[in-house]
Structure formats: C-alpha cells, structure tokens
Image (cartoon, coloured by chain):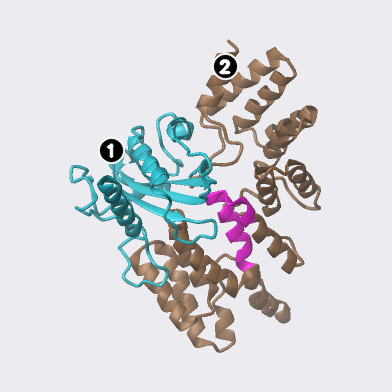
Amino acid sequence: MRYIMLISFFLVALYSCGQEVANKTDYPLQVGDIHFDPKIDDPNFTLCDQNNVWQYYNFAKGLQYNGEKARIVEHFINKLKVKEHEVESGFLTIRFIVNCKGQTGRYRLQGMDKDYQAKVFNEYLTSQLVKLTKQLDGWIVGQYQGKTYDYYQYLTFKIEKGKLVEIMP
Amino acid sequence: MKKFFYFLILFVPAHAYCQPNCNVYKMNNDESCYKACILATEAEASQGTKRSQLQFDKAIELCPSLDYAYFEKAVPYLKRGDFITWKKLIDKAVELNPKGHLGYRGWCRYQFLRDYRGAILDFERLDSIISYDIGYSANGDYHLNVAKALCYKAIGDKHRANEIIQNQLTQKDYSPMPYDYLHLGVLKMEIGDLNGGIDCLKKSIEINDYLAEPYYYLGLIYKKQKKSKEYKENMEKAKSYYLKGYKCLDLYTHIMDKIYLADIEKELKINN
C-alpha cells in the first residue's frame, strides 16, 4: 500500500511538472524547459550545457535512436503488459532530456484524454510506460557541425481501451 | 487596378495562415490591432522563447481578435509535446478564424497525435464552410484531402480512402505531391488490387525516385504474386536507397507507410 501511495505521489508530481497553462505569464526561458527537481530527478544525470538544450527536431533528422523507431516500438510492444477489460483511452506523453553522452533524465509526464483535457492514467499502465521509457538506451547523441548537444525528446503513447496503438513522434 | 490591389490586401490574408498582412488593420484605422499584428509577426522569429510568448500575450491584449497571435503562440507547445496547452490556444485561433485554421488544426491532429477522427472532423468542417479548395498541410507535403484519406484508412475505411485520393489526383490543375502515389499504391495493395498497386508505386517512382518505400511495397506485392526475382530485386533496391538516405522523412514525426531498415532486412532474411 505504501509503495502504491509513493508511486502515485511520484506520478502526480511528474504530471504536474509538465503542465503550463495557456495564459500563464511566468514562462520559462524556452517553452517546455525542464529544470532539475531534487525531489524527482536523478542528481547524477548532468547536462553538457544547461543553457543550451536543443529540441530533437532541431537536428532535422527526426527521432534519433539506434535501430530507429522500429526498435522503440518493438520494445514497448514486447514488454508492455495490458490488463484485460481495460477501458482507458487517450494520450500519455513522456518528455525527457537526452544529454550529450546519450544518457537520459528529467522525465516528465502529461496525460490527456481524447478531448485534449488533462487526464491521469491508471498507475499500472503509467508506471510501466515510465519504466520502459527509462530502459531505452539507444538514444543517439545530438550532433551539429561536429559539436554535441543535449536535447529534449518526447514519446507520446496513444492508448485505446488500455491498449497501446501508436507511439509518436 | 487599384480596386484589385485593395481586394488583395483586404481579402487574401483572411484565407491564409501564413503571416498576416498587418496593413489591413492600418487601412481600417485600427491602431491597436495594427500594433498587435506587428508585435505578433516579430515574435514568430524567436519561436518558443519567453520573450516571444510574452510578446504574443501583449498582442492578444491589444487585439483579442488577432487569431494569428494565438496560432503562433500555440506552435512551440505542439512541437514540444504539450498538446493540452497547444489545443487550448489553437482552439481559440479556430474560434476566431475557422477558415484560416481548421485545416491546420486537423493536419496537426493527424501528424502529431494520429487523432484520425478529430482530424477528419476538422477537414470536413472546413470543407463545409468554404467554397474553395481546402488546401495543403503545413509542411507542404500533402493536400489535405489526401491527409483526410489517410485518416479514413487508419480508422478502417480503406475503400473510402482509396476513392478520396483517386478523386484528388483527378482534380484539374492538381500536381501530385511527393507521397500521393506511394500511399495510393499501398492502399491498393491492402485492398487486394495488386496490379493497381504496382501501377501506383511505379508512378510514385516516376515522380519522385528518392524513396526506398515504393520499392519495398513493390517487393511485397511481387512476393504475394510469387514473383521471387522481382521481389528480391525490389527489396535489394529498397535497401540500397534506404542506406543512401532516400526515405520518407518528417522532421517532427513519422510518415504513414514509412518503413525502417529493420523491415527491409527482415524481408531479405526470410527469403534468403
């Protein structure tokens, strides 16, 4: 029980960190910036340049992963366990940073229903998706003109009646 | 001639979602909206920055009906995976100017989220409120009718998708886009029209011979037809093209019917 409560707290904390309200005026320096939070982030995960974190699309190569996206899809399809009679549908986005060494950290979640409203998915599904995302170890280091960069990446999972039907981007 | 120019200045921007013509506001003596429009167009250059987002807010404050400011303010949220905030902002732009933004919103629902049903609703609503062509995707790769067809395919209505693409390709003055015949060829293969699929995929190669995908799907069709020589030749060609970087690419997300190297290698492995 204690374990479930801790996980739930962790997920809610992650979820709330990812939110920005449309009319909020205290914007981060860049939309979507993820700052280190000692309560949930691994202190051993470091960035090469915290003032210059790129977005994955800045490299103009799409999603960069060893074995390409096919390998990511295979990873989730093979390992995600789905409960029978599950009814939840929507989108769950996990955003994180790939540093200049290809390591990942600062994971944040955003759950959304089919009407684009905030949604908290059940813990069984969410914790699996977070765990499986953290297991991905083939992220390619972002490079541009011979220099390496940290970058933001996200994965969006489209869920229909508890089943994973698509992974984006 | 002068009247024609006034017509262009006043009406053309209403139907486009590129940068607005701020002079429209000036001509109407609407100083607040003119200033807002200038602010918003300047802010676009530093997309996603705090300064840019604040500038859009200022523009919206000065001119609450400026749909362009909502539209541009929304873009970085979309690209960076905050779809809830994106939707709130793009909905406001659509509310203010449905003709200008419904096609874009529908395209993004398809491209970024594979929200097929939502995208179809937007495309069809746009079609119902305009009397002209519904236009093209934001990245310029698709006519929105073809995007709509792909959404129908994804929800299982492949025959309807086939009809929509075929109809689009026969429209007067329509030039096929880079992936039209690839998608149509794959669709025909999926509905069992193998010879139709071959014709379309060959046409795709004729129009744009910089993709591995048509060769891969041609290979699959030849495999179904038990033409092993043609199957293998096309798979080998797909592999060599893929390794040269000739493949479907979208900077933000993946293209429907895109293949990966693993797909080709799996085929070659099975049949060696």
User: Under tag 1, what secondary structure?
Assistant: loop
Image coordinates of residue A3 in percent, x first then y, are 27, 45
Chain letter for the residue marked with disc 2 in the picture: B
Q: Both on one chain, marks 2 and 1?
A: no
Side of A103 where B3 appears, left or right: right
The one of A4 and B45 positioned closer to us in this rendering: A4
Q: What stretch is highlighted in magenta?
A: B100-119
Vertical arrangement, residue B56 with respect to residue B229, above or below: below
Residue B115, magenta (yes or no) = yes
Q: Name the residue under label 2.
A: B268
Give the residue drawn at x 62%, y 51%.
B116
Given residues B47 and B192, the one toward you in this image is B192
- Looking at the image, the residue that sits furthest to the top is B272
A9 left or right, relative to B154: left
Disc on res. B168? none
Q: Name the residue under label 1.
A: A103
- How far is disc 2 from disc 1 in space, using C-alphas? 33 Å
Query: Which residue is at a point 60% across and 65% down the rendered structure image?
Result: B101
Helix, strand or loop at mark 2: helix
Residue B138 appears in the figure: no
Instruction: Give the main secondary structure of the magenta stretch.
Output: helix
Which amino acid, by three-letter code, is at mark 1?
Gln
Chain identifier for the cyan-coloured part of the image? A
B182 drawn magenta: no
Q: Is residue B204 visible?
A: yes
Q: Colour of chain B?
A: brown
Q: What residue type is labelled 2?
A: Leu
Q: Which residue sits at x=34%, y=66%?
A: B50
* B201 vs B170: above or below: above
Question: From what the image shows, is residue B230 above or below residue A66?
Answer: above
